[in-house]
Image (cartoon, rainbow, N blue to C red):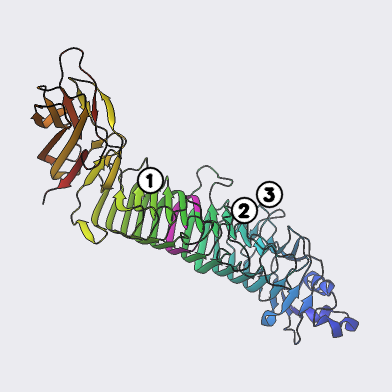
Amino acid sequence: MAVSLLDFVTPSDLPTAQGGVTDIGYAMAAALASGATYIVCPACPVDGGYNFGSGSFTIGSGQFVEVEGQTLIKSTSPTSIFDFTGYDARSGLRGGAYSMIGAPAGSCALRLRTDRDAVWGVRISGIRVQDAYCAITDVPTGAYYSVDCEFTDIQCRWTKGTQIASRRSRGFMLYRDVFIDNTLGELPGHSGINDRVTWPSAVFADFIGIELRGRFHVVGQSTGDLRPVAYQPNAIGVLIDGDVAPEAGLNRFVWGDTIRVESSEGPGIVVRSAIYLNMIDMEAYGCLGTGIELDRVNRAMLLNLRARGGNNLDGAPASADAISMTSCSQFQVANVSVEAAKRDGLRLTGCTDMLLTNVDAQGNDGQGLVETSGNLRNLYTNVTSRGNSGSDAVTLEANSRVTMLTMGDELQAPGSRSAFAAHKAGTDQTGIPSNTFTRLAFPSTRYNQGGYDPVTSQARPQAGLVTLKARALVTDGIKIGKELSILIYKNNAPLAVDTIVPSNAGAQTLSVEVDDTANGTDVYEAYVYLGDDPTGGANKTVSGADAWTAFSCAPIG
């Protein structure tokens, strides 16, 4: 049965019902209570739309409401305008522009009542929400779940809080063509609007499957002209949080295409604790925080990751990267662009078995590409690092590799072999005992294309022919006539050595070079042996200057 909302309006209220003067929430309540399966809210011929007062109206199973012509619906409900309890694919809402000026904090335009029953198959499309603390939400403390619901063509403006919140779902929740605009909060005539976003714009938690299709676009406030810019750590554009209410044995799937966050005063896109992340076009531009954060995400296939940071914006914290990946594994990523970050372009920590192809890092304040600690078996192909203020060097851990690397304007590694240049970062190595084989420490690198661990100062280059070089400047404790040697060790035994016998007590330069065939597991280190009298010899010092003391490896051929 189909009915019109106006069929339930008291005749004397009709002249003022259209225009939003008279509260006709009672008519919507009566239409829904009539048992009608299709309720039409006719297009309003005058400005002002319809006023639903402070009531809340339940669209139950088998009921569908259509608001024609983007007609304005005004509400001051302390809870929600429409509640959904439907348990079939016929339930839903289409159309309408919903204004909640005057509604209190905690209210929301549309709410899936997971505290009453499972909400399954609800379809909501073609809506505009403004002046609201929330557009679409559920009840995260409820005993039930929303399941297999779809939301299409959703716009949120003049925001006062998190607009999209799915925090208790099962099955696959689909969001298609969603636009959240936080830039209009300062405009006059929209009472109660906050002038600074301090909340995540969209939150997805306690889920099995989330699909973000078509366009999911969030615009923040970081470049607004009417307020000072300040970093807000909770002002996340899109937060997908698998840490909330985790259940043992449940995977958390995320699919999407064209997820874009612009000008957030916090991080752009954050994904935590997800398995099977499949995305096309994840983009973050001009965010004060890290553009894209992936934390404990496993088994991902990603195409086109782009992040431009906020190193030219006031308020961006020094720790903001363009893209960061932490404790992630088994990624296949193609086409990564990172630029203008306050810190590093692409930063990995504790990641394993990652394959990243076509990485372009330019104009970042730190390095273009850096692995920090705990990374293992990561492979990068076709990497360009250019114009980064910290360094164009690529820093990888010992078991990671890069192929086809361009640093600055120079092609560094046309093959798939390890190369590094390690140094002491200007710190002298003091207290070296006489007449003892002592390993030199090289805790920093000018570049590291894999195969070198700056923590242990050990090299483990990829299999093939390599050239290894070591040099050292001995500056203190030199004994005339006693040998000074520098050695390259292979698997805890000397591989090559060069020895001098000083004729004066001045600083002495040592160097050694050797070609070898590495098998991929061989370990190479640099040592010194600094001679003196058998007893009473003074401790020695090796200079920390990069020009004089260094350890390097390069492939041959």
Residue under the image location 68 percent in, 72 percent down: 187
Highlighted range, magenta = 271-291
Please say if the residues under marks 3 and 2 sit with CB atoms less than 8 Å apart.
no
Q: Please say if 190 is above or below 506.
A: below
Place of residue 334 in the rendered image (x, y in percent of width and height, measured from the top left) = 34, 61
Around disc 3, counting alpha carbons within 10 Å, would you say few (fewer than 14), some (14 to 19), or many (20 or more)? few
- Which of the two labelled residues, at mark 3 and mark 2, occupies the earlier sequence position? 3
Q: Residue most toward the top? A: 535
Marker disc for residue 141: 3
Q: Nearer the viewer, mark 1 or mark 2?
A: 1
Left or right position of 362 against 99:
left
Residue under the image location 43 percent in, 61 percent down: 279
Q: Amino acid at mark 1?
A: Cys
Place of residue 433 in the rendered image (x, y in percent of width and height, measured from the top left) = 23, 21
Which residue is under mark 1? 351
Which residue is under mark 2? 168
Secondary structure of the residue carrying tag 2 is loop
- Which of the two labelled residues, at mark 1 and mark 2, occupies the earlier sequence position? 2
Q: Amino acid at mark 3?
A: Thr
Is 174 contained in the magenta span?
no
Quadrant for the N terminus in the image:
bottom right
Of 531 and 265, the residue lying toward us: 531
